[in-house]
Amino acid sequence: MPASAEAEQALPRFVDSLKSDQKIRDRLNLTTDIETLRQVVQSVDASLTGSAVIPLEQATRAPKILVDSGVMDQEISWRLLRCTGGPLVLQLICCKANFAIWIESC
């Protein structure tokens, strides 16, 4: 079951935080593993509990439902997409790895 629309607003706020904080972008660009990713994400917003390292093919595949996208400083590409019948997901393409971030719900 997807998180509430209100809870999902944490993902666009996370993107805004990344845009305004070079240190977080630097940390993401150096991240290569799931544990470090979780630490970086949790340092910004503890409600973002779902995360995964994903292959570039998945990070660049055409989404079924694209909500928003862009490119930040330091060449971090991002996109918010809606999984059919599922959660809102933030995908990030960083220097060393690619990530998916979402809110896990009970």
Image: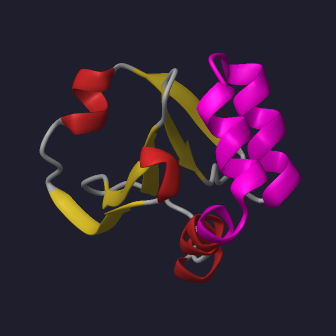
- Which residue is painted at 22% across and 36% down in the image? 60
Residue 53 shown in magenta: no
Please tell me which residue is depicted at 50% across the width and 48% down the height of the picture. 74
Foreground of the two, 47 or 13: 13
The percent coordinates of residue 4 (x first, y second) are 57, 74
Q: Is residue 21 left or right of residue 100?
A: right
Residue 39 lies in magenta, yes or no? yes
Q: Please name the predominant secondary structure of the magenta segment in the image.
A: helix
**Vertical comparison of 89 with 35: above or below:** below
Q: Nearer the viewer, residue 51 or 24?
A: 24
Residue 43, position as x, y percentages in the image: 87, 51
- How far across and down, in percent of the image, does residue 33 sit? 66, 16
Q: x, y percentage for residue 28?
A: 65, 38
Asked if one can make out residue 46 in the rendered structure from this viewpoint, the answer is no
> Residue 37: which quarter of the image?
top right
Which residue is drawn at the image coordinates 50% and 23% (left, top)?
97
Q: Using the image, determine if residue 46 lies above or below residue 28.
A: below
Tell me if 98 is positioned left or right of 29 in this view.
left
The reply to whether residue 19 is in sight is yes
Over which residues does the magenta segment extend? Answer: 17-46
Nearest the eye: 14 or 106: 14
Indicate whether 30 appears above or below 80.
Answer: above
Residue drawn at (65%, 48%), measured in percent from left and top? 25
Colouring convention used in this rendered image of the protein? secondary structure
